Amino acid sequence: MAPLAAPYARALADVIAHAHIDAAQVEGQLADFGAAWHASSPLREVLLDPSFSIEEKVAILDKLNVRLQMGPESRNFVAVLIRHDRLHLFDEIIDEFRHEMNRRLGISEVQVTTAHKLDDAARADLEAQIAGLTKSRIIATFHEDSSLMGGAIVRIGSTVYDGSIRGRLDRLEEQLAASQA
């Protein structure tokens, strides 16, 4: 993450909280802008080109906003990114905004790595166990890694719970090596 993304994400979260606006609505509006941003190479080129004035770029944003119908907070946020020459960080800022809103809402972001793809029931069961462990709501992202052989590795922030067979074998190997030393 670019070091500049977090302050912009926090500022957007502060504006939304102060105005009592639904964060999901703002996120949806910004996702619409992001889709237009990614779909149109000419739009990106113009908005990132330093030879165009800030006023010209904001005017283009306003014309685009006629179709997108972003709320004033979302539109103004994109305009701030244009004015501060930070639009190139849009994806990172929005990503950090999601993390910030999750933190503020008490939602833990969890990465789960399993040896095999889990069916919906197994995912729901594992998510319920993790939610009980964290005592919070969670958003889980699942990955697969066949080298684990079985079990799962759960990362919650900087804490890692390794319940994989590979992890157990590694720990057993370390214990055996320590006992023979």
Image (cartoon, helix red, strand yellow):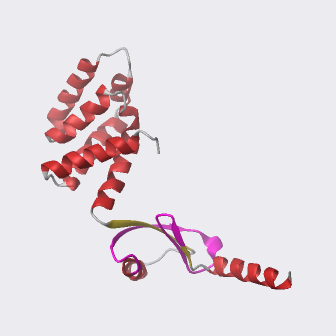
The image quadrant of residue 59 is: top left
Residue 168 falls left or right of residue 134: right
Front residue (pair 57, 105): 105
Q: Position of residue 73 (x, y in %)?
A: 18, 41
Residue 18 falls left or right of residue 40: left
Residue 157 falls left or right of residue 16: right
The image quadrant of residue 92 is: top left
**Residue at point 35%, 70% (across, down):** 138
The quarter of the rendered structure image containing the C terminus is bottom right
Give the magenta range.
Answer: 133-160
**Residue at point 79%, 84% (across, down):** 176
Q: Position of residue 76 (x, y in %)?
A: 20, 35
Q: Is residue 109 magenta?
A: no
The image quadrant of residue 49 is: top left
User: Compared with residue 37, is residue 149 higher up or lower down, i.e. above or below?
Assistant: below
Q: Is residue 159 magenta?
A: yes
User: Compared with residue 12, is residue 75 higher up or lower down, i.e. above or below?
Assistant: above
List the single residue furthest toward the top: 51
**Residue at point 47%, 77% (across, down):** 118
Residue 117 falls left or right of residue 27: right
Q: Position of residue 29 (x, y in %)?
A: 22, 45
Residue 69 seen by the camera: no
Q: Position of residue 17 (x, y in %)?
A: 19, 52
Residue 29 seen by the camera: yes
